[in-house]
Amino acid sequence: MKFKEKFIDKYSKLTDFEEYKESVVRNFARKSIRINTLDYTIKEVKKSLERDGWLLRQIPWCRTGFFIEHSTGRRDIGNTKQHKKGMFFSQGAPSMIPSLLMNISGKAKVLDMCAAPGGKTHHLACLMNNKGYLLANEPNNFRKRILKLNLERCGVENVAFDSQNGEDYTNNEKFDAILIDAPCTGSGLIKGKIARTKKLLREWNPKITTKYAKKQRWMLEAAIKHLRKHGRIVYSTCSMEPEEDELLVDDFIKDHDDFKLLKNIRVEGYKVKSSLKDYIKIWPQYYDTNGFFVAVIERK
Ligand SMILES: C[S@@+](CC[C@H](N)C(=O)[O-])C[C@H]1O[C@@H](n2cnc3c(N)ncnc32)[C@H](O)[C@@H]1O
């Protein structure tokens, strides 16, 4: 696998490049699932999967999340009867963090601005116990269909749908919490000797973030128009690029006196490993997963 000089230069300033590289090329990101607690108990789903040879290991920061492997090495957890029945949602372990930081209950009004294929929307519905009001926005019609099918499969009932571009988002409603799981370069989704990894490394260039960073910033600007006082925005990406992550959020906060960045954000069970203490930045080598970034912003 070939890493460009400029990539090595940039990433060496951000993390331990040798550890990062070793982790990226070693194996695929660990597979994981989150149990659909709207319709099933953790115990019954575990029992059913274990009977079929799947081995589940608790994800330390998500009570309903499990790393999953099969005794034969198969990885197609999506091709199981348990998946068809809606017993779980396939979701990367770091992706379980944003919904946990939304600080919501069944009374909340929540907007999920970039919702498909629905992993986080489903997690939010579970945390809200299928109550309150959850609005799932997804502008791509093909992906919106998949989103709807996934949420139907998992018995989500408190959701309505919208399909606007996040950066121009308009609505008469004000929300208690907004999730922006933004479209991004995806440079965190790199673990495994697969075509996607090779393509990402081939296409990566120092300007790769420009287009996305603009869109992400406009999404934040649009979201704040729909956030109530003391409301919260959770912003996440599967990018490792600071221009889409910590630098973008820092700039946003500098330009908005009426917003604050939540400092030292914590999720129980998640051990902070990055030097960026006010953000959750997960590098692939930390937990043998893909990379991920999360920030939490609040209206004062
Ligand atoms: C990282 S994915 C979201 C994953 C999803 N939150 C989940 O957990 O399953 C980003 C999504 O944003 C959508 N998207 C792309 N451009 C968008 C835009 N301008 N506004 C809102 N969403 C957009 C993509 O179609 C994609 O479904």
Image (tube, rainbow, N blue to C red):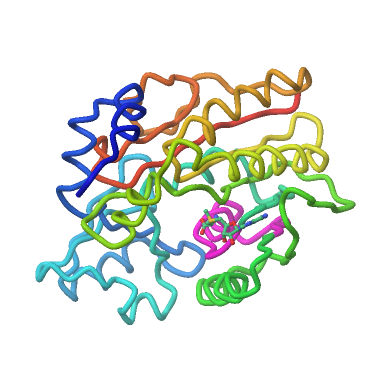
Asked if the stretch drawn in magenta spans residue 165, the answer is no
Asked if the stretch drawn in magenta spans residue 124, the answer is yes
Residue at far right of view:
172
- The residue nearer to you, when weighing 266 against 257, is 257
Q: Which residue is drawn at 61% across and 53% down?
A: 128
Image coordinates of residue 126 in percent, x first then y, are 54, 57
- The residue nearer to you, when weighing 199 against 272, is 199
Q: The C terminus is located in which quarter? A: top right
- The residue nearer to you, when weighing 63 against 92, is 92
Image coordinates of residue 146 in percent, x first then y, are 55, 74
Residue 258 lies, with reference to residue 173, above or below; the image says above
Please state the total of marks drawn on the protein image.
0
Residue 54 lies, with reference to residue 2, above or below; the image says below
Q: In this image, 226 relative to 106: left or right?
A: right
Q: Which residue is drawn at 72% across and 66% down?
A: 160
The part of the image, by quadrant, that contains residue 71 is bottom left
Query: In the rendered structure, which segment of residues is drawn in magenta?
Result: 115-135
The part of the image, by quadrant, that contains residue 296 is top right
The part of the image, by quadrant, that contains residue 219 is top right
- The residue nearer to you, when weighing 18 against 30, is 18
Q: Quadrant of ligand 1?
A: bottom right
Residue 118 lies, with reference to residue 201, above or below; the image says below
